[in-house]
Image (cartoon, rainbow, N blue to C red):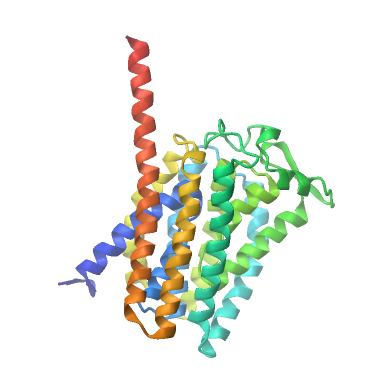
Amino acid sequence: MELFGIALTILALFVSFGFMVGVLFGFFGMGGSFLVTPALLVMGYPARVAVGSGMAFVFGTAVIATLKHHDLGQVDYKLGGLMIVGTSVGIELGRIGVFYLEDLGLASGVIGVTYVVLLGGIGLFVTRNALTNDGEDDSGGHHDGADDEIDPDAIPDIAKKIQSYRVPPMMTIAGGIQVSLWMVLGVAFATGLLSGFLGVGGGFIRMPAMFYLIGVPVPVAVGTDLFEIVFSGGIGSFLYGMEGGVDLSIVAPLLAGSALGARIGSAATGIVDESDIKVYFGLMLLGGSVAVAFQQAGDYFAIEVLNTVGFVLILLSAFMVSGAVIYSTIATVRERSNVSAASAD
């Protein structure tokens, strides 16, 4: 049975997958198309459709999540505006690279290998720092706003080192932090290049970069990253759409699921301490890396079962971490309710 030309089983899969990814997107400011694009590649969609549809999904989900973070006061619009400038240039160069590689017949392979390296490397980095609490204050959580002064002890050592190099012009960002404009634009350009090339919002690199390299408080990094993704995702999906790279039959059911998931994930940032979840996010990145590696091996050796294993691993990664976010949110709310009830007695 089909609806709008899509088998109901595939439709249900896209809606549920969109919900899980929406939770991750709202909570971490990332986790959108870096899961969606590899999944579409595993399902056999052409590289430009997988990348373009992933970008369009990112745009829609980012709009939903940003509105919630705006309500929580977790968006630095000045920093976000500067990030948009650098990102826009990078996206166009990345898009040109994808179409060039596609003409050579190398796009899927190169994009897949890049995913494996990036997801694996960043996953190891995030997991190691989550386990060691490198330079982080466990009491902070996701509760800070963009105008709150940041505790100097909560800034990672590497960000403090970078901030010590005062290359003018300097600017003041969230938490009263001063940083070189060139560092902000450099991070924006690099993640924009990846956005255009991989069909991702770039958040799984940009959000850690804003925290570890620039020193932006985690909650504000999440909200500002999502604000930037609204523009980068919109630009990218428009450019890919002009080339026939956006399939609305894929994007629509994904967005239907993510509409609810993104609101839940964004609301959870005001409840859950991100240190409780960060290690799972690192493991999710590693899971995504392994999944794409299976897919690439399946294509290279023409073994279909490896593609299936890769697809299942992507779904499991999204399900486990989004489930952890929801579980921690419910557990925290119940704990607070019990404390309130005990105090009332």
Residue 150: horizontal and vertical position, in percent?
Answer: 66, 34
Q: Could you say which is closer to the camera, residue 302 or residue 56?
A: 302
Q: Quadrant of residue 202?
A: bottom right
Q: In this view, does 47 lie to the left or right of 210?
A: left
The quarter of the picture where the C terminus appears is top left
- The residue at 44%/84% (across/down) is 300
Q: Could you say which is closer to the camera, residue 40 or residue 68?
A: 40
Residue sitting at the far top: 345
Q: Vertical placement of 232 versus 71: above or below?
A: below
Q: Is residue 15 left or right of residue 97?
A: left
Q: In this view, does 108 lie to the left or right of 308?
A: right
- The residue at 31%/64% (across/down) is 14
Residue 274: horizontal and vertical position, in percent?
Answer: 50, 40
Residue 307 visible to the viewer: yes
Residue sitting at the far bottom: 104
Q: In this view, does 302 lie to the left or right of 73?
A: left
Q: In which quarter of the image is residue 53?
A: bottom left
Residue 241: horizontal and vertical position, in percent?
Answer: 46, 75
Question: What is the count of numbered marks?
Answer: 0
- The residue at 47%/54% (across/down) is 283
Residue 246 visible to the viewer: no
Residue 233: horizontal and vertical position, in percent?
Answer: 51, 63
Q: Vertical placement of 151 versus 127: above or below?
A: above
- The residue at 43%/63% (across/down) is 35
The quarter of the picture where the N terminus appears is bottom left
Residue sitting at the far left: 1
